[in-house]
Amino acid sequence: LVCLSIMMKSTNQQCNSFQSVVGIFLHSANTLETVRKFLLSLGISIFMTTINQAVSSLSTKADKNITLGKTIQALFVYDNLDIDLKQSVPTVKNNNKTMVHLTTGTMLPLHPTTLPEHLNCSQELWEKYKPRQRLSIPLMKLIKLHTNTPDSEGLRNHDHFNCWKFLFNLVHYGLEYFCKFKSKLGQAEVYKAVPVMKTKQVPNRTLDVAPSMPTQNAEAIETFLAQVALRNPTEIPGVMGVGNQIVLISGDLLTGKRIRSLLAS
């Protein structure tokens, strides 16, 4: 411990992040003040005033995150996280229990052009939702969603893109002869492009839940919504409900399958 203290004090500028993490951990664990002062003297932790300022800053950011979730103007994303906590000295009791199954989540703010009235369609979705019914939509019907008039050559917008993509693959991955036409290829024609905007993510608290079953997915979704104070007002008075608003949730393919199974049950 003395050697560690000497090394940390000699490289104090490189240990700020480590000291800050230790300080926040001591605060979260309600460590005695005498222990905090002792670790501070060793250079392992930071001043208690700095810890309090960091906690206040994190609390302010947490309030902003809750405000974002309350507006429902965010996409809730979650997925499973498996961690293998291997022990340096295996024991008979925990020899086969080193794998921990968790659920991580984050919130992605929606595009600024998304308005609350755009999400005000929960009742309509429930009326059109038919559980256990497999929908079969012909591909040609999807193509006709955005119809446009053919040009003089009889090509539509998607035909122009397919032609450009074919030429792109030809000059980049085709015979060496076609490489000389790379400078003449140009860019694909832009059609109703969505403006590129920088977004951010707001992480949620990790859950000690393995989303491997439909009921566990329901628990994960309910807990993530509860983190931003979105609950059922009929069960908990004073909290905010979603009303007729829809909440956008994203995950992998298995997530969608388990949620559909949960809705159909």
Image (cartoon, grey):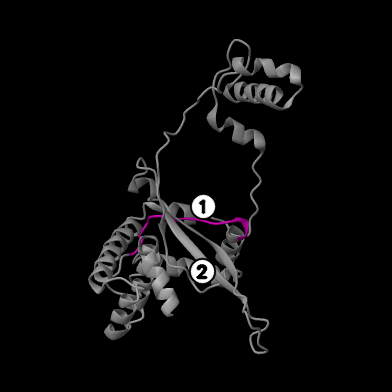
**For the residue marked with disc 2, what is the amino acid?**
Ala
Q: Residue at x 62, y 79 (%)?
A: 88
**For the residue marked with disc 1, what is the amino acid?**
Lys
Left or right for 142, reference 75: right
Q: Is residue 231 visible?
A: no
Element at label 1: helix
Name of the residue lying farthest toward the bottom: 93
Magenta region: which residues?
241-254
Residue 156 position within the rendered picture, expressed as x and y whole percent measured from the top left: 59, 21
- Does the segment drawn in magenta span residue 29? no
The answer to whether 234 is drawn above or below residue 93 in the figure is above
Mark 2 crowd level (few <14, some 14–19, many ≥20, 10 Å Cα):
some
| Camera-nearest residue between 142 and 80 | 80
| Residue identified by numbered label 2 | 218
| Camera-nearest residue between 252 and 20 | 20
Mark 2 or mark 1, which is nearer the start of the sequence?
Answer: 1
Residue 219 position within the rendered picture, expressed as x and y whole percent measured from the top left: 49, 71
Name of the residue lying farthest toward the right: 175
Q: Main secondary structure of the magenta part?
A: loop
Residue 56 position within the rendered picture, expressed as x and y whole percent measured from the top left: 25, 67
| Residue identified by numbered label 1 | 128
Element at label 2: helix
Residue 179 position within the rendered picture, expressed as x and y whole percent measured from the top left: 69, 19
The answer to whether 36 is drawn above or below residue 132 in the figure is below
* 1 and 2 marks in contact (CB < 8 Å): no
Q: Is residue 158 visible?
A: yes
Quarter of the image where one finds residue 173: top right
Task: Count up the numbered dots.
Answer: 2
